[in-house]
Image (cartoon, coloured by chain):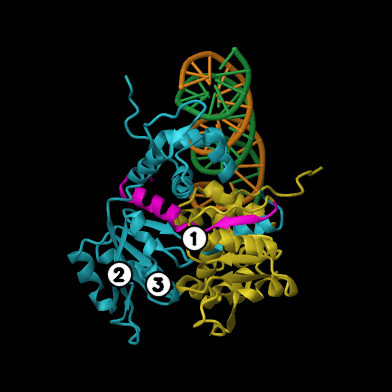
Chain colours: A cyan, B yellow, C orange, D green
Amino acid sequence: MKTKIVQNVSKNQLRRFPVYLSYLKGKKSEGVNSISAPSIAEALGYNEVQVRKDLAIVSKTEGKPKSGRDIQALISDLESFLSYNDVTNAVIVGVGHLGMALLSYKGFSNYGLNILAGFDDAEDIIGKEYNGKTVFPMSKLTNLINRLQVHIGIIAVPDKYAQEVADRLVESGIRAIWNFAPVHLNVPDNIIVQDENMASSLAILSRRLKGVID
Amino acid sequence: MKTKIVQNVSKNQLRRFPVYLSYLKGKKSEGVNSISAPSIAEALGYNEVQVRKDLAIVSKTEGKPKSGRDIQALISDLESFLSYNDVTNAVIVGVGHLGMALLSYKGFSNYGLNILAGFDDAEDIIGKEYNGKTVFPMSKLTNLINRLQVHIGIIAVPDKYAQEVADRLVESGIRAIWNFAPVHLNVPDNIIVQDENMASSLAILSRRLKGVID
DNA sequence: TAGATTGTTAATCGATTAACAATC
DNA sequence: TAGATTGTTAATCGATTAACAATC
């Protein structure tokens, strides 16, 4: 009897899945139909056992010794595992250069993220549209979040406003925050915060550049 | 005899350092002068032993039982550990919304990153300035990288051009690439690639939102 | 003094890697 | 068949957490 109902997936694995997906899509567009774990591992710099275990988590299809696994099946399985077909609604607060970039980016729809609108209080951008998405004044935030069942709030305001925006989002009933401001946000325990901290990323890059790690 | 000369620092630790730094700066600006590991742990959601070990790596100053550690000393030590005072030069390739956002962001100078210029082949933005940084045509890339000893190339072009831009950067003598395109780049072993993959980040956020992890 | 906090050593936990039998 | 590849179990490695004596 198999008791393993809910698969345990680590954050590191979750991070790798979109990388596999993008790599496999690239291969597929080159006309390749099947691929082996060792070759994926080689290309992406992962360990081959790691690749096998990762793929086993998302896909029930089996590979064949010698030839490998079917690329299309893997792509479909990765997409469904990552729920790229279920759409989650989001709003962006802060439509400066970064907010604009996020509003304008068309790729999110491939990842199941539907950004509905932007919010900002700067007179000169209220009412503008980017990628078909309108910028509203902050006063409309709560209403829109409630009315359209928005679950994710994206924070793209300057550091000093990040906390108050977070508070506003929480009050408005958001469930998760994707935070692009490099500051720690204080929120209730039931609210999820995902930090996109470029300072952290840069710290790793700098260190690697000095040859201390990797 | 102490033999531990080079401190081993993991990527996770490196990711946490800027978070401590920003938190401590915030506390300092509130007028707080010393702080305990448990209180930092509580605020940031880390384990307190982890905090102590992390801080021990960057700082030789000692804390005092009961009162804790000196905030200013920790801030200085974190900054010097992260080399926020040594400046590394970088260029950005691709001045769309995202490239513009990165060019315009003034925070990087606090992290020891000096973005010198942007490169793009779109006629309408060549010659423009953002945050005092000029956008040059791609034809000037190699020359500028060599002349100004640029070590980091930031890729902010659409996915399909990312690989060719990476190749150009490598040919031009860059040593590290900060890659904002959600595609895997193929580069020689001696070139460092740091992926800033929003798809990966989003995958984690979505899963947490579904309540499966964390 | 008592208690909060320190720094460190030991135990636990989890993730990565190695080893191996099975198979196309 | 031989060899590449499979999936899985066992071993290793590293990071996190718990336990503890020292001290302001």
Q: In the rendered structure, are the residues bearing label 2 and label 1 in contact, judged by CB atoms less than 8 Å apart?
A: no
Instruction: Please state which of the two labelled residues, at mark 2 or mark 1, is closer to the viewer.
Output: 1
Boundaries of the magenta span: B190-214
In the image, taking residue A197 as reference, residue A207 lies left or right, namely right
Rendered location of residue B80, percent (x, y): 68, 64
Q: Name the residue under label 3.
A: A99
Give the residue at the far right of this rendering: B1
Same subunit, labels 3 and 2: the answer reads: yes
Query: What distance separates the C-alpha of mark 3 from that of mark 2?
Result: 17 Å
Which dot marks residue A178? none
Spot occupied by residue D1 in the image (x, y as percentages of width and height): 59, 12
Mark 3 vs mark 2: in front: 3
Chain under disc 2:
A
Q: Is mark 1 on a helix, strand or loop?
A: helix
Where does the N terminus of chain B fall, quadrant-wise? top right
Which badge, 3 or 2, is on the more N-terminal residue? 3
**Please, what secondary structure does the residue beneath circle 3 have?**
helix
Q: Mark 3 lies on which chain?
A: A
Q: Name the residue under label 1.
A: B160
Amino acid at dot 2: Arg
Q: Mark 2 = which residue?
A: A168
Nearer to the camera, A131 or B81: A131
Q: Do circles 3 and 1 both sit on a common chain?
A: no
- Amino acid type, callout 3: Gly
- Vertical placement of B149 versus A82: above or below? below
